[in-house]
Image (tube, rainbow, N blue to C red):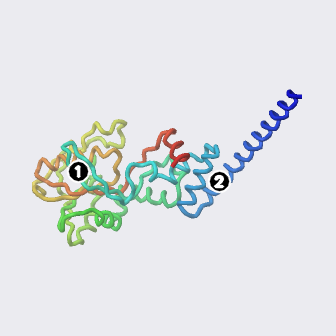
Amino acid sequence: MEKLIIWIVLLVFFYLMNRISTWKKRAATAFLVVGQRATTKEERKWGYRNALRAGEQKAERFYVYSALEDFMDGKPMMPFKMKLSNGKKIPAIFIDYYIPKRDWNFITEEQRKFVQMVYDFKDGRVSCSRLFKEALAKLDLPDSVTVVFMPCSNQSKYLTRFSRLSNALSYEEKLHPMLYSLTYLEARESKHNIKDRDKVNADSNVIINADIVGKKVVIIDDVITTGSSIKEHAEELGKYGVEVVGIVCLAKTVKYPEKVEIWIESHFK
């Protein structure tokens, strides 16, 4: 009799486990559909997160890119401090995230449009002046400040990338863009083509012009990844008596989180 009861209990247990597994798979699919059909950022994040929690691994990248602010160090349009090697902290801000094209299948149309705009800015097709002005307004800057631009691999790329923006900012009363604050000595290899990009010094092919000596400046760049290049340039400017009072970047490159970080974030936070 006892053995019969044990067998009945085991059969009921395995039956329930099987049903729970089936329900969980159905729930995961339903949550995934919610994420795909969502019309708001919050709904999208909720759907993909719950799909991942229910065991749908296909939802992982969709979830991460719907919840980037939960994984990244900085948040768009939120000022933060960038610390130099000498201990000085400079107010900095970026406008939104840069997501590599290999992951475009997992992001929203709005995110794709922003990243495409970053490419257009790099190629000199748009100035993004409105976005840069909004970002500059969020920094606690002096009443009058000089705007300088990050060195590129060669002068042609530099002028293509920043000429439109420099011209647009020149109409602002408190901003004084100086497109020609650098003299290019030669071309260098682009950091984007190098695996260990931090080994290339951003200032290796330029010299600082005397016109900006002693001025208070804001550095503008297109994309920040590790921040090492901007820090190097800020420190190089400091050698010429230039005080860097702010840093503004159009985008920050996304660093995809580790599996364990994704699991913790989706299950416990």
Q: Quadrant of the N terminus?
A: top right
Q: Amino acid at mark 2?
A: Phe
Percent across and percent down for residue 140 are: 24, 63
**Residue shown at the point (43%, 44%) measured from the top left:** 255
The residue that label 2 is drawn on is 31
Percent across and percent down for residue 213 are: 10, 55
Name the disc covering residue 17, or none: none
Q: Amino acid at mark 1?
A: Lys
Give SS at disc 2. helix
**Residue shown at the point (27%, 53%) measured from the top left:** 158
Image position of 150 (left or right of 239): right
Image position of 33 (left or right of 251): right
Q: Is residue 144 above or below residue 200?
A: below
Residue 228 found in image quarter: top left
Dot placed on the residue nearer the N-terminal end, 2 or 1: 2
Front residue of 168 and 70: 70
Give SS at disc 1. strand
Number of marks in the image? 2
Residue lying at the far front of the rendered structure: 2
Q: How many C-alpha atoms fall within 10 Å of the one at disc 1: few (<14), some, or many (≥20)?
A: some
Front residue of 46 and 207: 46
Query: How far apart are the two marked residues, 2 and 1, measured between alpha carbons?
Result: 43 Å
Percent across and percent down for residue 56 are: 64, 45
Residue lying at the far top of the rendered structure: 3
Name the disc covering residue 89, or none: 1
**Residue shown at the point (22%, 48%) measured from the top left:** 233
